[in-house]
Amino acid sequence: MLTSSSPSQVKTSSEEEWEAASEPDYDTNEDLLYPYSPTPYFGMYHLVKIPIGRGLLHHVDYWGEGKVTNLGKIRGFPQSYNVNEQFALVSKGHNKGKQIPNRIPVVSVDDSDTSSYIRDDSVKTVTISTGPITKRCAADVARIVNASEGLVVAYGYSDNSDDIQNLERELGKKGLYYGAGYELPADLRTQTEFSTKRVFADASSINNHLYNLVTGGDYINAVKTVRSLVDNQGSDVCRDVVSQLVSHGIKNAMSFAYKLWHEGHKDIVEDYFPSEFQLILDQKRIKLIGKHYNQALKLDANVDRYNDRLTWGDGKDNTSYRVSWRLISLWENNNVIFKILNTEHEMYLKLDVNVDSYGDRKTWGSNDSSEKRHTWYLYPVKVGDQQLFLIENREYRQGLKLDANVDWYGDRLVWGNNGTVADNPEYYGFIIQPWQ
């Protein structure tokens, strides 16, 4: 396997030092099949590419030196192949100066190509730390990692470094993407020498990860993940996740869109979310139309003794200034909430403090907006291909609905429903459209 017929060459001092070094520590590290620890990088050797046969290599650690413990800190792994320079030795810890265990040699940090040793698309986990991630190194990492179930972890690099940008770009071409806050398996959480890590996984895993970030309310990591997806050829994953969030009626979808909108990522909302989200977050004038009866909300022309106005679904008018509203978004307790402003009267929608015999509450337009009952949640839902929203009051947790009965104008009172509305979005859902 390791025979050579080439003529001898003058050895460099680094080669002589490497040859004179102690053998790798295979007490701390497992001796894997077909490592090239005793072999420099020369093309004349008859090499066996790994893995042998079917299946994936479990772990390759780029610039790895095996498991190293130094000053109580751990880096490296005891059961990985370690890609490193051909004459590199363990640089620190109790094995300092020894040959690197399970080493796959490359010529140098600027000339890192393992294609003579490792098959394409053949490694389940690739880790990398300490060494530079040049464009060539990043391309080699992307070459060896498996596209369907691969995982790449970069330890100790700053997020905006050239190293990470090189890696992110090449992995994006392969279909592996960054997942902020991605939970690693236990054997990859051992690297106590490093305070940072950046994890890249296959498209399916990142799809699930981003979905769970949003449903769990982790918007910081969700925003980081989706930004990286869009910037690194992961647009299809972004589009799929947003579609799932909206079609599944995930309540946090609106809060996720809000965070994107207000943290400098409006382009993602504009390009990947239904157009209604942009109308809402841009505080455009809109119409709120009850789907079941196809009536737009308005305020009464008259006021009661508190100067409040009842809310109606209009039986005829779908275009005038009376049916114009604006949604004012606020962030509170890790959720986006809304005040619903009627632009004709500059009054805010609220629920009555009193209930009728069914436990329902009338809705009013109010000059004041200081109470919790003046604020609302908007939950996106899909009925067929139509985008709807459930509108729920924060104080009483009642969703809006239109009365089953009409007055002599054909108008319907608007109520807060005493009961769930999520199980019948076609009846309780509202269409949001531009006012004009």
Image (spheres, rainbow, N blue to C red):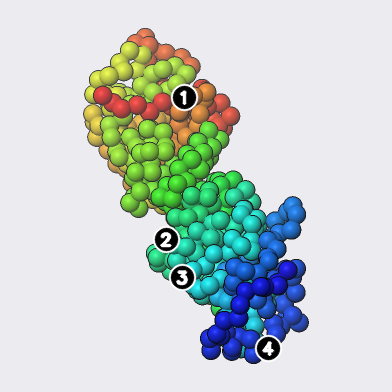
Question: Marks 1 and 2, Cα distance to the nearest angstrom?
Answer: 39 Å
Label annotation for residue 165 = 2
Report which residue position mark 4 lands on.
Answer: 22
Q: What's the residue type where badge 2 is placed?
A: Gln
Proximity of marks 3 and 2: CB atoms separated by less than 8 Å: no
Badge 1 is on which residue? 386
Mark 4 vs mark 2: give the one in front.
4
Report the residue at 59% width, 71% height from top: 42
What mark, if any, has residue 50 been given in the picture? none
**Left or right of 344 on screen, residue 416:** right
Q: Quadrant of residue 153?
A: bottom right
- The residue drawn where x is 38% and y is 32% is 276
> Gap between marks 3 and 1, in whole Å?
54 Å
Residue at image position (34%, 43%) is: 267
Rendered-image quadrant of the C terminus: top left
Mark 1 belongs to which amino acid?
Answer: Gln
Closer to the eye: label 1 or 2? 2
Q: Earlier in the sequence, mark 4 or mark 3?
A: 4
- The disc, 1 or 4, on the residue closer to the chain's N-terminal end is 4
Q: Label 2 near label 4: C-beta < 8 Å?
A: no
How far is mark 4 from mark 3, CA to CA?
Answer: 26 Å
Task: Tell me, yes or no, whether the two marked residues, 4 and 3, touch with CB atoms within 8 Å.
Answer: no
- Residue 67: image x %, image y %? 65, 78
In this view, 334 is above or below 422: below
Residue that badge 3 annotates: 110
Helix, strand or loop status at disc 2: helix
Closer to the N terminus: mark 3 or mark 2? 3
Q: Position of residue 218 (x, y in %)?
A: 50, 54
Mark 4 and mark 2: Cα distance apart in space: 37 Å
